[in-house]
Image (cartoon, rainbow, N blue to C red):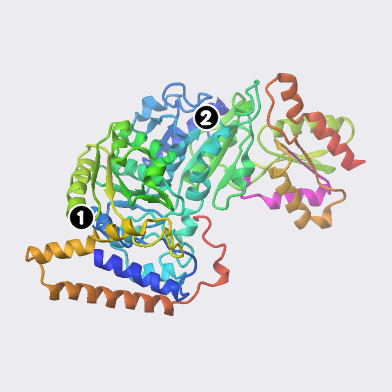
């Protein structure tokens, strides 16, 4: 999954540089262990609410890479027929309530989804993704407070990649671990190495099981790093090159591969095959997107209201 | 159809209860709903006893999440009826309403819908001051994807709250404070009022007075005064602002040729401008005089009673505007 996400994102980046992607994209490359490690625990009837940097979440929840790519390219065969684009991509068959253009908007939405899960009483869970920047928004405060007092089955996953756009986390937050904020609401807060997919998987297992069994919400902080700038055209000069080089060494995919090789869980040939398959898949996705027609201008104002 | 004497508050609560019995996915959430009911005692009337705390939920003071959580719950199959104690608090949840609730169906190409109702209390009464008295329906009217209704009578309040709950779109349900105590025989059971349909409250052939919320009684008073001067005014209660019932407006305009639109919201950018522009664009052939707006001055709402009285449009102003058009 991590390799598929990385390959998809890098295909998007290449296509963007070539002029084939309208607008800017907020690439997930580097954060794959979080999406993969958390969402591995989710079933089809669990939910994910995502962010502006959400392709990884959407893919990990089982979305079709072809329809994702077509949506990023604004074509009619995309998930949202080109009306949503990269930041408003959803798949209701898989409980993906969308990437989102407003930082922090995912939290209240996920909280309400959690209420529905509680009513249904079928052990469903909602996972909410957001970043270190979003954890300063009032939506974070209100959502965690509400989920805590109503004991909702929501796992709030903070992808702390040390930057809120161009502002370093030490400039926007005075505490070191966003996870510490859980105690302010009376809920468990855990911090983990977000670039270690095993760490993420294990921390998420506990949080998701807690939610499934009526134990309420958890704040799970995953410390990670984004490879690209905030958006595709951002060269990220605000980041210290030395720090960037160091953090790149913690690449979650490389670490997972080294672990698998070291433990004899996979051979180099098998790992190559995973990459080859991913490349073939995303090549096909890009081809699918390029061939898909643009939506008709007649559709500009259709679907504003549900019938 | 049986009826029961109810005031506006009870009518809204009764409509909500009727839907909650019919549909287990409907729930209520807001501040104070289990203790005092909503600020004006609506939700409290026996709803907690009948439906329990799981479906009548008190919230912390979290207007952003009151609306925001409703978006999520609605998207995955529930029908939240949430509330703000005062419409003035819309600023706290405007992203949730305008960017999240209103746009989900469109942006996601119909994969999700947001069948939620946001009840709010509007209007200047009792020296409440600038943050507890506004009429902000224009904010919602400007957001495609939202519907905005403002019932005047208890029967319409009950009929429209049921329609709003059943509607698959986010609906802003505006309850003017001055109307909450009014009473009448209200139809019970399966009685609905359609969203998007205005009501002609008084027929007349000389001038059309268009209003909503508490300005409808004001316009009816003005119509009485005008009748004393030999002018028959037709009074239209819009009931729904978006979607606007253009047909009823234009049929009336074709008859009278003169139109005054009156609202308690401030003049600039008020929804009266939308009514006036629409009527001028689509009914120009029938206009015998310019469209006039009667509205509050462009200012925050003052606290002191004489100032507040000067702020809220009075029947005399509507009468004067109509007389100008008829002279």
CA separation, marks 2 and 1? Answer: 47 Å
In the rendered image of this protein, does residue B327 appear above or below residue B177?
Answer: below
Q: Residue B184 sits in which quadrant?
A: top right
Looking at the image, which residue is at 42% across and 67% down?
A71
Magenta residues, start to end: B240-262
Report the residue marked by disc 2. B85
The chain to which mark 2 is attached is B
Report the residue marked by disc 1. A196
- The single residue placed furthest to the left in the displayed view is A264
Q: Is residue A227 left or right of residue B190?
A: left
Q: In this view, does B259 lie to the left or right of A259?
A: right
Q: Residue A218 sits in which quadrant?
A: top left
Along the line of sight, which residue is nearer the eye, A22 or A112?
A22
Report x, y in % for residue B168.
Answer: 47, 50
Report x, y in % for residue B271.
Answer: 69, 44
In the rendered image of this protein, does residue A152 appear above or below residue B304?
Answer: below
In the rendered image of this protein, does residue B130 appear above or below residue B246?
Answer: above
């Amino acid at each position: 999954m991590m390799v598929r996400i990385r390959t998809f994102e890098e295909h998007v980046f290449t296509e963007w540089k070539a002029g084939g992607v309208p607008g800017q994209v907020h690439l997930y490359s580097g954060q794959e262990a979080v999406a993969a490690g958390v969402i591995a625990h989710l079933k089809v009837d669990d939910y994910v609410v995502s962010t502006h940097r959400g392709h990884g979440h959407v893919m990990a929840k089982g979305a079709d890479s072809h329809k994702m790519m077509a949506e990023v390219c604004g074509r009619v065969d995309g998930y949202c027929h080109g009306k949503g684009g990269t930041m408003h991509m959803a798949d209701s068959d898989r409980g993906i309530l969308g990437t989102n253009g407003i930082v922090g908007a995912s939290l209240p939405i996920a909280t309400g989804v959690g209420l529905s899960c509680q009513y249904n009483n079928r052990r469903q869970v909602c996972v909410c993704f957001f970043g270190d920047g979003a954890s300063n928004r009032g939506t974070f405060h209100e959502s965690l407070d509400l989920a805590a007092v109503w004991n909702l089955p929501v796992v709030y996953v903070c992808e702390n990649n040390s930057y809120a756009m161009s502002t370093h986390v030490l400039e926007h937050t005075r505490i070191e671990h966003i996870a510490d904020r859980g105690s302010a609401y009376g809920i468990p807060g855990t911090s983990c190495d977000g670039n270690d997919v095993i760490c993420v998987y294990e921390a998420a297992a506990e949080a998701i099981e807690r939610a499934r069994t009526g134990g309420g919400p958890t704040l799970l902080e995953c410390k990670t790093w984004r490879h690209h700038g905030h958006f595709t055209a951002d060269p990220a000069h605000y980041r210290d090159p030395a720090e960037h080089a160091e953090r790149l060494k913690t690449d979650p995919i490389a670490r997972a591969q080294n672990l698998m090789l070291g433990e004899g869980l996979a051979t180099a040939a098998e790992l190559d095959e995973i990459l080859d398959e991913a490349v073939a898949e995303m090549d096909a996705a890009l081809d699918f997107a390029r061939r898909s027609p643009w939506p008709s201008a007649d559709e500009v104002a259709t679907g504003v209201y549900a019938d | 159809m049986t009826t029961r004497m109810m005031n506006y508050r009870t009518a809204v609560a009764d409509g909500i209860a009727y839907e909650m019995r019919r549909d287990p996915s409907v729930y209520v959430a807001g501040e104070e709903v289990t203790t005092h009911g909503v600020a004006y005692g609506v939700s409290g009337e026996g709803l907690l006893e009948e439906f329990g705390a799981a479906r009548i939920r008190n919230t912390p003071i979290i207007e952003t999440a009151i609306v925001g959580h409703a978006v999520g719950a609605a998207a995955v199959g529930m029908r939240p009826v949430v509330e703000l104690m005062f419409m003035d608090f819309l600023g706290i949840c405007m992203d949730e309403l305008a960017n999240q609730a209103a746009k989900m169906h469109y942006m996601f190409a119909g994969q999700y819908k947001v069948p939620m109702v946001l009840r709010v209390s509007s209007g200047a009464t009792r020296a409440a001051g600038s943050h507890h008295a506004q009429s902000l329906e224009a904010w919602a009217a400007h957001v495609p994807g939202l519907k905005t209704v403002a019932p005047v009578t208890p029967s319409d309040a009950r009929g429209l709250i049921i329609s709003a709950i059943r509607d698959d779109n986010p609906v802003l349900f505006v309850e003017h404070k001055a109307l909450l105590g009014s009473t009448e025989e209200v139809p019970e059971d399966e009685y609905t009022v359609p969203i998007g349909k205005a009501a002609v409250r008084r027929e007349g052939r000389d001038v059309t007075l268009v209003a909503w919320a508490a300005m409808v009684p004001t316009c009816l008073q003005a119509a009485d005064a005008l009748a004393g001067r030999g002018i028959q005014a037709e009074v239209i209660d819009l009931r729904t602002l978006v979607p606007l019932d253009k047909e009823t407006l234009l049929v009336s305009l074709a008859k009278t040729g003169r139109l005054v639109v009156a609202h308690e919201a401030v003049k600039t950018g008020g929804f009266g401008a939308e009514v006036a522009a629409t009527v001028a664009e689509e009914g120009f052939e029938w206009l015998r005089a310019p469209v006039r707006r009667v509205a509050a001055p462009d200012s925050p709402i003052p606290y002191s009673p004489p100032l507040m009285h000067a702020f809220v449009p009075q029947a005399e102003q509507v009468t004067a505007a109509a007389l100008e058009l008829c002279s």
